[in-house]
Image (cartoon, rainbow, N blue to C red):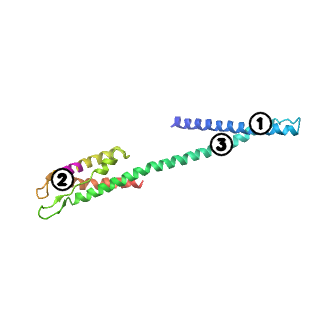
Amino acid sequence: MANHVSSDLASYVLDLLRNWWFRAFAFLSLISTAITFYVLFRPGFLLPKAVPIVTSLLALLISPYDVYKRQQARIRELLKENALLKEPRKTSLADLISELDENLGKASAPTMDQCAASGGIYVRPSTERWKAVRNVIQLDAQLRDRLARTYEEVDRWRSIVDSGVKPAMGSPDLDRIVARLRTQVPGLLEELRKLQGA
């Protein structure tokens, strides 16, 4: 912490000195140019000795404010960049929440009566949004691990549905999976919604 503060202070002082030197040099150059033309009309005119000192002091008074303004502008830029970085995360969270919510609804009613003759079918869960954001979304390790385990269950559920098993045949594995998801997913949704609102 102390090293960070000293580094920031050193950076500020160097910035201030550079700004002071530039302004003092600019003021003195302006005065020198003005005096060059002024002596054409007033031969023998001598520049008061206090002028360089006054000019340096004036530059010293202006420089901190100038550095302050530039630092404030930089802070505003960083805040804007930070806001832009958060937007993709919020979008990813919204997509993930939507998918989990849909899967929770399917887990609560995992069968669909497509036609009476076939005895219905198992509904197919979704994993597309999780696969699209899992490598880019910023989450703490524990929450990411819980999501990964939940989606492993969803993948197993999806594989069972893709295998062609029908509700009339029954699937104890699928029944256990959807029962676990009905317990796990509400807590995950609550945490993700808190992050979304942060």
Q: Residues within 10 Å of mark 3 (few under 14, many from 20)?
A: some
Q: Secondary structure at mark 2?
A: helix
Q: Residues within 10 Å of mark 2 (few under 14, many from 20)?
A: some
**Marks 3 and 1, the one that precedes in the sequence:** 1
Q: Is residue 105 above or below residue 83?
A: below
- Disc 1 residue type (three-letter): Pro
Residue at mark 2 to residue at mark 3: CA–CA distance: 69 Å
Residue that numbered label 2 is attached to? 161
Residue drawn 52% across the image and 37% down it: 4
> Seen in the image, is 79 located left or right of residue 167?
right
Number of numbered discs present? 3
Q: Is residue 195 visible?
A: no
Residue at mark 3 to residue at mark 1: CA–CA distance: 19 Å
Q: Is residue 64 above or below residue 157?
A: above
Where is residue 83? Give x, y as percent: 47, 50
Q: Nearer the viewer, mark 3 or mark 1?
A: 1
Where is residue 35? Give x, y as percent: 81, 38
- Would residue 177 be counted in the magenta stretch? no
Residue that numbered label 3 is attached to? 64
Q: Secondary structure at mark 3?
A: helix
Residue drawn 84% across the image and 39% down it: 38
Q: Nearer the viewer, mark 2 or mark 3?
A: 2
- Disc 3 residue type (three-letter): Pro
* Residue 116 in which image quadrant: bottom left
**Marks 2 and 3, the one that precedes in the sequence:** 3
**Marks 2 and 1, the one that precedes in the sequence:** 1
Magenta highlight range: 154-160
**Residue 52 tag number:** 1
Q: Residues within 10 Å of mark 1 (few under 14, many from 20)?
A: some
Classified by dominant secondary structure, the portion drawn in magenta counts as helix
